[in-house]
Amino acid sequence: MSIGNMIGYKKTLSEWQCLSEVKMGRGSPISPMLWRKIVEQYQKGVSQRKIAKSLKLSSSTVHKIIQRFRESETISVRKGQGRKTILDARDLRAHRRHCITYRNDTVMEITTCAQEYFQKTLSVNTIHCAIRRCQLKLYRSKNKPCLNRIQKRRRFRWAKDHFKWTVAKWKSVLWSDKSKFQVNFGKLGRHVIRTKEDKDNPSCYQHSVQKPASLMVWGCMSACGMGSLHIWKGTINAHSYIQVLEQHMLPSRCRLFQGRPCIFQHDNARPHTASITMSWLHRRRIRLLKWPACNPDLSPIENIWRIIKRKVRQRRPKTVEKLDACIIQDWDNIPIHKLEQLVSSVPRCLQFVIKRRGDATQW
């Protein structure tokens, strides 16, 4: 194709792939349906120009497919075309077993093991292609808490004890937790538009701060609505935690449940399990939900923190005051149906914990 034709007509990615595959004689990578439509319209007497215009393809692509049909009188792919693969089907099965067994290995480590096992010269690109041919892909692993054997056993036992709870009983739980929010500095986009030579351009850097300004936030929620929010100032100890419970937890419980019985949930942090905190809760006759250690994937409020952090990250506040305002605004805008959906999913989470014998779930 000449330069003028390339400027006058821009092909899509699928068209270029189809044209290249036709030239190489391996058939269309899209589907045989496209070949069948072209041949059917050609047999009805439709011109190649109209076929290309109706199917949004180039005239050269349609011409190659019709020329193939004239030569072989079939739309099947010709055999024996193209370069033979280095790894056959048996090698791919062995390669897939190795990749699944050693999921955390790097591509270089997998390439070295494949060269030693197959006794062939293999490059990193060949291993990348082999991984894709095995219906696998490189993903970023999820961050989950490290659970030892005792913690898994306690999680499993706790899930079995609370598995028979109904959704209505889980809706009577007041969930509480605290989370840390940091001020975002600079341009925090995950990607930057640049050329290969502009990697050392200062405008393409992502600047980081060693100790950015942050806020520690405490909040509570239930299926009935969002509770109060408290911004920590100073150190967090048992005395300050009791003040937060008096100023925010008790009014939230009265406003959300309106005198109905409820269960209060918090984790096993040191201010929560201190003797003065437990005695204060006992004097107030507040029922507590027994909570095992390292159990954040079963608390619905963790999902609320994740939603708020995603929204705050999109706004990119530059000061602590703006960060505080963004957190409060996003906290008040959480819809009720979202809270009911999160609380109603707790029995399903318990089912996964029981199925995995106390190990971390997908949430």
Image (tube, rainbow, N blue to C red):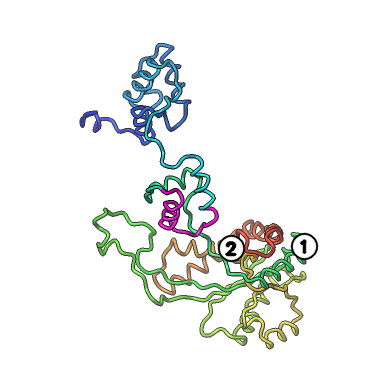
- The residue beneath circle 1 is 165
**Residue at the top extreme?**
45
Quick check: can you spot residue 242?
A: yes
Quadrant for the N terminus in the image: top left
Quick check: can you spot residue 228?
A: no
Identify which residue is drawn at 37% across, 35% down: 83
Q: Residues within 10 Å of mark 1 (few under 14, many from 20)?
A: few
Which residue occupies the foreground of this view, 279 or 230? Answer: 279
Q: Main secondary structure of the magenta part?
A: helix
Q: Amino acid at mark 2?
A: Asn
Q: Position of residue 200 (x, y in %)?
A: 25, 62
Q: Position of residue 215 (x, y in %)?
A: 49, 76
Residue 316: which quarter of the image?
bottom left
The secondary structure type at the circle numbered 2 is helix
Taking 337 as reference, is 236 above or below it?
below
Q: Amino acid at mark 1?
A: Trp
Q: Residues within 10 Å of mark 2 (few under 14, many from 20)?
A: some
**Which comes sooner in the sequence, label 2 or label 1?**
1
- The residue beneath circle 2 is 303
| The magenta segment | 100-119
**Residue at the front extreme?**
119
Identify which residue is drawn at 52% across, 76% down: 216
Q: Is residue 197 left or right of residue 224?
A: left
Magenta highlight on residue 208: no
Which residue occupies the foreground of this view, 120 or 294? Answer: 120
Taking 238 as reference, is 160 above or below it?
above
Identify which residue is drawn at 39% across, 70% down: 318
Instruction: Measure how far apart labels 2 and 1 are at the Cα level.
Output: 21 Å
Q: Position of residue 64 (x, y in %)?
A: 34, 22
Q: Position of residue 2 (x, y in %)?
A: 21, 29
Residue 163: which quarter of the image?
bottom right
